[in-house]
Amino acid sequence: MQEIKCPKCSSDKITKSGIISGRQRYKCKECNYHFSVAKLGKVIDKYYVIKALQLYLEGISLREIERILGVSHVSVMNWVRQYGIKAPENQDYRPTYKIFSHEELVKFMSSKAQIAGSGMIITELGDKFMVIKWERFKDR
């Protein structure tokens, strides 16, 4: 069992002091501080955080990232703020993306017509692969 310490003075001299909202409250005998044990929140794997930020930097919208990764767009927005990520200035293009299985990706990449004249990033999404594509050379 984890030893509980006072968050104010770090003393281990504590006593139980009732239950509030279904959570045990404690009282520190040293400083008379009342506290509850920290609530454990849902933790999202860092893999999804990194992938979401990569997709955001590539110009994919928050809602599209939500659909692709299955992570709330609000969470993605919070990560963008937390890590201070600045999206590059939006040019006159919008990247397109497709999600492939391994076999579909091999077939896609074997066609020169699919990859000529464009920039491309391939990233892994679990057992699938995502190809983000944009025009490299544009007529102005």
Image (cartoon, helix red, strand yellow):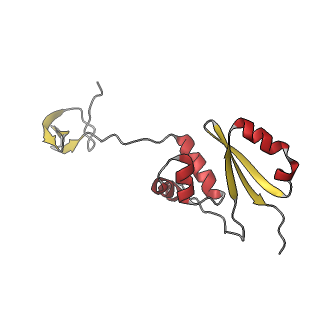
What x and y, as percent, mark residue 74? 46, 57
| Residue at the spot 54% in from the left edge and 52% down from the top edge | 67
- The residue lying furthest to the left in this view is 18
In the depicted view, which residue is nearer to us: 86 or 102? 102
Give above or below for 14 relative to 34.
above
Residue at far top of view: 1
Position of the N terminus, as image quadrant, is: top left
* Observer-nearest of 135 and 8: 135
Q: Image point 34% across, 40% down: which residue?
A: 40
Instruction: Identify the residue at image location x=66%, y=57%.
Output: 58
| Rendered location of residue 49, percent (x, y) | 54, 47
| 101 sits to left or right of 109 | left
- Locate residue 61 relative to residue 27 in the image: left or right: right
| Horizontal and vertical percent position of residue 76 | 51, 54
Give the answer, above or below, for where 59 lies relative to 100: below
Q: Residue furthest bottom?
A: 140
The image quarter containing residue 14 is: top left
Q: Residue at point 14% right, 40% down?
A: 19
Quadrant assignment for the C terminus:
bottom right
Residue 24 percent across, percent down from the top left: 19, 37
Question: Left or right of 40: which side holds 137?
Answer: right
Query: How many discs appear?
Result: 0
